[in-house]
């Protein structure tokens, strides 16, 4: 039986008199058929105010790698509550969290904690400029590094506005940006080492920031030799290499994408899966760079940085992930889900591509060939994909409209079977 979402639709509409659009993030606007109002989470499921139980592949936009309400995380936070909420001082639990990161993440000689990915990106940019004395930050087309004015350029530019591959345009992602903020950022096409090297050889770039695996769009793996080449050229040109591992960190491997790919950046930023749903982010990197916060007083602050409740969740989450067995178990089920989807698209004669990693992958419609960068997916049929996710929701599966699928430890074999069956029904209803 197809599910309905009228209670969510009414509640969001009513709340718009208090909260713009009835939502507290623009990424929750315009979801088809309506943004949802959730009553509770449980394992791989969400329960909404219409009484629907939904298999959840949003997973909080990526953080819930252990599933909703995992006992070890909930218990750790409850224990910490007995000791207090906020101290404006240090606590032992934050040092435990830092020690875990130091052990797991190749670049993490030093670690500082914050509350959001957007914040730690700013810290990394500031350190790169302080270390090099240069102003320009280089980013890759289609990569997302938070919503602040100096980085939210060319995140999802329309094809007509992208400019040439040799000189991608600086396309603002929002009205109201400081137009001068774009003067200190430059843009290159990802997975193109020759053009990147040409740009870095000019010698004016303080830091290159990139997703080591392009998860913001299509979950694109780096081409053979690309990331290694990026590391080499950054070292040769004195450019600080910054990996944005807000999505990949602790999701694709215990040490993040850098451990999976075998390439160590100078700095890296983390969030999402680091604390399985608590608002925790981190910047980690070379000791000499991170210590600039002390030796040169490079400003990094925040009232809620290393919040004890978040640190308790971080320690519990990273402890659960440390030996890699969680990732291995998710991988088995994730591969089966990816293969099931690709088989259905092929059997239903629907043009589409499933690519990425089993812990986070992407489904693209209207495209069959491998996707190597943002420009390769501009002809994807995004309207058809929204029809598909709307149909999936009616069959009890909640999937992101932008195409990403996040898996958790709680997605067991029965859940995977139910998802594949729902996907087949949804494809037949929405696309055939």
Image (tube, rainbow, N blue to C red):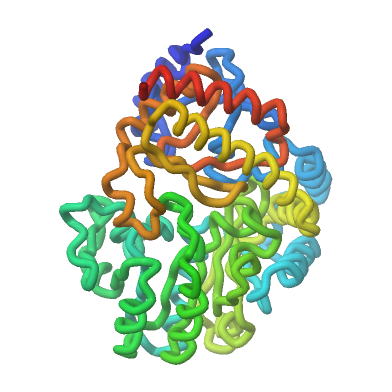
Residue that appears at 50% across and 29% down: 344
- Does residue 236 lie above or below 317 as drawn? below
Residue that appears at 78% across and 60% down: 93
Task: Classify residue 246 by image quadrant.
Answer: bottom right
Residue that appears at 56% across and 40% down: 338
Q: Is residue 68 visible?
A: yes
Determine whether, in the image, residue 385 is placed left or right of residue 128.
Answer: left
Residue that appears at 76% across and 65% down: 100
Q: Position of residue 14 (x, y in %)?
A: 38, 19
Q: Position of residue 77 (x, y in %)?
A: 76, 45
For the C terminus, the image quarter is: top left
Q: Position of residue 383 (x, y in %)?
A: 30, 32
Q: Which residue is more in the foreground, 355 or 133? A: 355
Q: Which residue is more in the foreground, 126 or 294? A: 126
Q: Which residue is more in the foreground, 18 or 231? A: 231
- Does residue 427 lie above or below 216 as drawn? above
Determine whether, in the image, residue 176 is placed left or right of residue 287.
Answer: left
Q: Position of residue 105 (x, y in %)?
A: 68, 69
Determine whether, in the image, residue 28 is placed left or right of residue 258.
Answer: left
């Amino acid at each position: 039986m197809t599910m309905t979402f009228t209670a969510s639709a009414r509640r969001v509409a009513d709340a718009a008199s208090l909260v713009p659009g009835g939502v507290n993030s623009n990424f929750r606007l315009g979801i088809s058929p309506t943004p949802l109002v959730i009553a509770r989470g449980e394992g791989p499921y969400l329960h909404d105010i219409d009484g629907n139980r939904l298999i959840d592949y949003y997973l909080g936009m990526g953080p819930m790698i252990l599933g909703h309400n995992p006992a070890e995380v909930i218990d750790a936070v409850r224990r910490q509550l007995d000791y207090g909420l906020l101290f404006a001082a240090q606590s032992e639990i934050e040092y435990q969290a830092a020690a875990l990161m130091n052990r797991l993440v190749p670049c993490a000689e030093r670690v500082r904690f914050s509350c959001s990915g957007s914040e730690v990106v700013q810290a990394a940019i500031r350190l790169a400029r302080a270390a090099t004395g240069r102003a320009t930050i280089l980013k890759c087309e289609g990569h997302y590094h938070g919503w602040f004015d100096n980085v939210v350029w060319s995140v999802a530019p329309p094809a007509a506005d992208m400019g040439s591959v040799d000189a991608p345009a600086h396309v603002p992602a929002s009205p109201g940006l400081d137009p001068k903020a774009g003067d200190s950022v430059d843009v290159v096409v990802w997975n193109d080492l020759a053009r990147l090297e040409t740009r870095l050889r000019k010698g004016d770039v303080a830091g290159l920031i990139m997703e080591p695996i392009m998860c913001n769009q299509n979950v694109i793996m780096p081409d053979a030799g690309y990331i290694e080449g990026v590391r080499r050229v950054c070292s040769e040109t004195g450019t600080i290499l910054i990996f944005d591992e807000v999505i990949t960190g602790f999701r694709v491997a215990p040490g993040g994408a850098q451990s999976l790919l075998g390439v160590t950046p100078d700095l890296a930023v983390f969030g999402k899966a680091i604390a399985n749903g608590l608002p925790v982010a981190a910047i980690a990197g070379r000791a000499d760079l991170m210590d600039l916060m002390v030796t040169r007083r490079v400003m990094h602050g925040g009232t809620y940085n290393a919040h004890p409740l978040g640190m308790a969740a971080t320690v519990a989450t990273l402890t659960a992930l440390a030996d890699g067995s969680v990732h291995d178990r998710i991988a088995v089920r994730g591969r089966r889900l990816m293969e099931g989807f690709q088989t259905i698209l092929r059997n239903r004669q629907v043009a589409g591509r499933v690519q990425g990693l089993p812990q986070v992958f992407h489904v693209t419609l209207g495209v069959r060939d491998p996707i190597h960068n943002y420009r390769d997916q501009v002809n994807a049929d995004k309207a058809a994909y929204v029809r598909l996710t709307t149909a999936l929701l009616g069959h009890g599966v909640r999937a992101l409209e932008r195409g990403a699928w996040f898996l958790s430890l709680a997605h067991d074999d029965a859940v995977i079977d139910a998802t594949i069956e729902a996907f087949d029904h949804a494809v037949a209803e929405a696309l055939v």
